[in-house]
Image (spheres, helix red, strand yellow):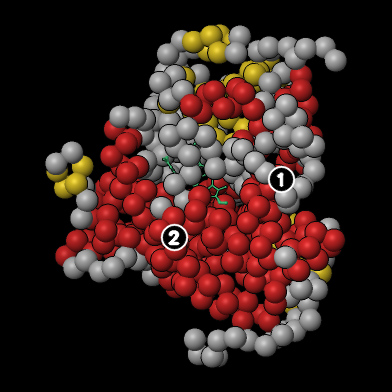
Amino acid sequence: MSSPRRCPAIDFDHNSQTHADDTVGSYRDIRTSTPVAWTEAHGGYWVLSDYSSVFDAARDDETFSSRRLPHGGEGLAVVIPKTPMHRHIPIELDPPEFRTFRKIVNQITAPAAVKRMQEMIDHYTTWFIDQVIESGECDFVDVIGVPAIVTVDWLGLDPEDWARYARLHRTTLNGLPGTPAFQHAVEVDMPQLSERMRQTITARRREPTEDVISYLVQQEIDGRPITDEEVFAITELLVAGGTGTTASLVGQALVWLYQHQDVRRTLIDHPEKLERAVEEFLRYFAPTQALARTVVRDVDFHGCPMRTGDRVLLSWASANRDESTFENADEIDIERWPNRHTSFGVGVHRCAGSHLGRAMSRALIGQVLERMPDYSIDVQALRRYPQQGTNVGFQSIPARFTPGPRRLPADA
Ligand code: HEM
């Protein structure tokens, strides 16, 4: 095989229909031929698609900034094209400013904190499955609302609003700009939900409770009280991080397990294998496919001349399929270990919610396998999100199974 060419211009757009039709094949093509390449799509950006370039860029935040800078337009800095959204903290900060905020978030997302949430996670998982278990059919997308409601409740927002928060973040990250659904999300849902978040922040300042927002409003940043705007920026990021990603992972894993019933049987008989299996599902499905940075100093990177202001896409999904790091990368091996996938990112911004994401995924997949062990999926009726550039996943997963009993009282 000839050695891969470096830094040519390629015809590539991670938000195009061609890419969405076959994300794995599309990334394989560029990773094996041009792992660091330039595309003119969306005003131009570098695409990094092999493990080493993704890993190196993600660890070099002095060159590859996450800050909101003017290059590439207005909006969330870590996606291409930038999407309309309030500034998020800490994901849109660079060190050293980043560190104080990340420490604050780590306190509430560390393994010990997630352990304290286990009861709530199990409760909501049981409740969501109870809603459909007697009927023998459901759309799994409704059941996998669990991560959204857990996140919203944990933060201290109104749990009744979970579906609206989930829809807002799904639409702004996966929807098509210009469509009525996208406009509605940006013009109606976003201002209304933001207003509710701001009201909750004000209320918790006055009278703190036990929730995350109450914890956040009491923090100090370099000796001064944290501002409401900063609390808002952290809270909204936690909602965005908590809602779509885990649901995407679980949805894709459930479809795959239906298509691979030998592995499903193994996990039903050996629930202790679920922990490593979830890690492998993360690698294989990469719910967050790719995120962006902005170059802040001229550099020669992997043989390519990058200039200040250039936008760069780091494909976690493609790095995870790099054969030089993962043997049989296109196959799922639920025993794979070690599994140094990049699905939670790499470097200082590595996912703050990874332990929570894993705990919710295990609870959901575990309970579905236990209570609906013979589920089947209408594969023809599966519908994916229109764009698969940033987050992948299904909008509809129609399923049938042998009905079973509820576990919670009807009025729970
Ligand atoms: C399967 C589930 C999840 C996946 C695949 C995922 C993926 C990611 C990725 C790739 C990043 C890196 C961002 C970057 O490098 O720019 C990230 C960051 C982050 N995630 Fe997650 N995430 C998941 C679950 C969650 C959950 C449940 C939460 C919280 C409720 C969360 C909160 C965050 C936060 C706060 C950051 C920013 C960290 C920072 O900038 O320091 N994530 N996530």
Residue 72: x %, y % from top left:
48, 26
Q: Which residue is mark 2?
A: 114
| Frontmost residue, 232 versus 256 | 256
Q: Residue at x 16, y 65 (%)?
A: 206
Using the rendered view, name the quadrant where residue 405 is placed.
bottom right
Question: Residue drawn at (40%, 21%), measured in percent from left and top?
Answer: 62
Whether residue 325 is visible: yes
Residue drawn 54% across and 90% down? Answer: 409
**Quarter that holds the N terminus:** top right
Q: Quadrant of residue 80?
A: top right
Compared across the picture, whether 408 is left or right of 138 comes to left
Q: Nearest to the eye among marks 1 and 2: give it.
A: 1
Specify the quadrant of the image occupied by residue 291.
top right
Q: Is residue 412 left or right of residue 406?
A: left
Q: Name the residue at 42% across, 13% down.
A: 297
Res. 190 visible in picture: no
**Mark 1 sits near ligand 1, with its Cβ under 8 Å away:** no
Q: Give me the C-alpha separation between circle 1 and circle 2.
A: 24 Å
Identify the amino acid type marked 1: Arg
Disc 1 marks which residue? Answer: 336
> What's under tag 2, amino acid-wise?
Val
Of label 1 and label 2, which has the lower sequence position? 2
Mark 2, secondary structure of its residue: helix
- Across and down, in percent, residue 28 comes to 76, 30
Image mark count = 2
When the figure is inspected, residue 36 is found, relative to residue 382, above or below; the finding is: above
